[in-house]
Amino acid sequence: MKFKKWNIGAPKEQDVALLRSAGYPYLLSTVLAARGVCNPEAAADFLDRERKLTISPMLMRDMDKAVARIQRAISDGETIAVFGDYDVDGITSTVLLMDYLKSCGVKCLRYIPRRIEDGYGLSKDAIRGLRDQGATLMVTVDCGITGNEEVDFANSLGLDVVVTDHHECKETLPNAVAVVDPHRPDCPYPFKHLAGCGVALKLVLALGGESREDALFARYCTLAAIGTVADVMRMEGENRIIVSCGLEALPHTDFVGVHALLKEAGLLGKPITSIQIGFVLSPRINAAGRMGAADLAADLLETADPARAEEMARELCGLNRERQAVEQAICADAICQIEKLRSEDRSALVLSSADWHQGVVGIVASRLSEKYSCPSFMIHLKDGMGKGSCRSYGGFNLFAALESCADLLDGFGGHELAAGFTIPEENIGAFRARMNRYVRSASGGELPVSSLDIDAPIACPGDVDLAEVEQLSHLEPYGAGNPRPAFALLGATVDAVQSVGQGKHLKLRLSKGTCRFDAIFFSVTEDECGVAAGMRVDVAFYLQANTFRGNTTLQLQLIDIRPSLTPSRHEAADLELLRRLLDGGPLTAQETARLRASRDQFAACWVALERRLHQGKAEEDTLPYLRQLAARAGGNESFLRTALALEVFRERGLISLSVQGDRLTLCLNNIQGKVDLFACPYLARLRDAANRNRGDQT
């Protein structure tokens, strides 16, 4: 199991039926009902995709000031510098604004920090360099909101600054000509979740005026869509419009670099969804910034030369492969460090090394947060200073946490889910201790466990086909707040397991009743999965169409798999029979015979139990635990008699056992002397029933 807890939605049958009666397909109706969309009118509203942005960009605080200063620079022939960031959001924001300004005849300078040499955000050296090149106005995109000191420095050089950003604000804003950020406490703009490229797009629409909004949106929505998906913004409101329109426009975009990247990634001519942007395009663009070559990605998106674009796209994909290798090495080293941490230092993972590539630690922090279910802080050390990247888990507010440790840091910036910081090396120990205390306090002492949100179990597996899966596309685009639909198949049987992709992935054949499903489990080996043919399992998955050699079939893309927590028909009957025995209910002669266990069978179960509990208390999923214990104990009616044995051991005081939901907690009690199992009233009841049955027969 990858996830310790599955949160499986339970849409009401009547809601699903109402939606289906209105013509919505089974799977789409199930997902809508699971997400609280319970009637046809609400469904129509939820699925409707607007074609344009309807909120005026001028509602953003200081947008009027930003437009006035930039338009004056355009009219006066000033040189404008665009200062961006090295991630996908920052790169697409930079290219978007640069392209518009150049179309206005502006002489533009572009500056994207080098992640390793410059670090995150504004820097005085970069600002001085832009001023020396003749810039009289600097516009920031996707950065600058916490650069108070650097903006003051720019002012001292005679360089005006317009800040556009979407990150969290500090108490005091930069002293810029304009500060455009929907997170400003005094900003009335109603949609607060735009990415940096979304704010840049709004700036361009404001600069162009209402008469040009449609044309400008059509040109730039693709760049804004890529940045929005990559920055994991909430997929609702204006973001949903930007991304859905951007995806639709992607095959026809005027940016030849995008076409070249699609071709190099093997996506040209194929349907592109937010999934492909998030997992194929974005990592390749991001790799440039992570490996210290963000300008390469910006050059690719800016170029109008198809041959040059293809060359740069190949280079970008090569950097991505290099990034993947570096990431794997850092992750392995970080896991070794984690294994040496004390338990009190595992609420928040604070790790550091001088050997780690600074550009890759952030993505490793994401992997670790998912793996260990807690916030992760990865710090690259150099010359006594640490540059850290951190990622949240379970909704933990990183920005607030960093604020609580501000006295230990030289600086920090970002938002609730992802942030960066600098820290003197000697402060890392104190930072680790304080951050762990903060996380424990914020969580009320109960640390989050890895959990998977599942929309609904498949109640009608026979109704799941390719046509149903195709209808799920009406929910696109997916992202934060509107995740890709996840389903569960409970109580399935594993018919076959096969390693594929040189042993890196797993292909399974599953069945539920008369229904058969092919499944793929990426990046999981047979040993890691721990399943074999014949096992009864629960699977969580996405549904997809898989095309192989021209043949398209339905496939489950597994997210997780576990021993089934739902009883089979035979197991349910056994547990009901045991319940009747415990409650003193009537038993037939055949049922009495099935329940009666020998001394050897009790002994075998006790030995198996001792082996499982040699390290103390066990907290397990009830049914899988019973199955495993029964398999070890062996013998006829092993599941039924193992369940009976546990009840006998509990009644006799040999074990403590409690069941809550699907989980049981069990431990051995310290008992002196021998215990007579057959004095247990349950076994006495069986003896009495057997004697009565014998008497009836005579």
Image: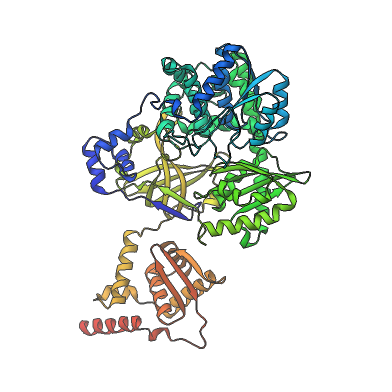
Q: Residue at x 65, y 58 (%)?
A: 433
Q: Nearer the viewer, residue 355 or 696?
A: 355
Q: Residue at x 27, y 43 (%)?
A: 38
Residue 41, placed above or below residue 489 = above
Q: Quadrant of the C terminus?
A: bottom left
Residue 239: percent from left, percent from top: 44, 32
Instruction: Work out whether residue 490 can be spotted.
Output: yes
Q: Nearer the viewer, residue 11 or 125?
A: 125
Residue 558: percent from left, percent from top: 46, 44
Q: Residue at x 31, y 47 (%)?
A: 514
Residue 323, picture quadrant:
top right
Left or right, 661 with respect to 451, comes to: left
Residue 660: percent from left, percent from top: 39, 66
Residue 321, placed above or below residue 461 = above
Residue 254, placed above or below residue 114 = above
Residue 136, placed above or below residue 28 = above
Q: Nearer the viewer, residue 400 or 678?
A: 400
Q: Residue at x 71, y 35 (%)?
A: 116
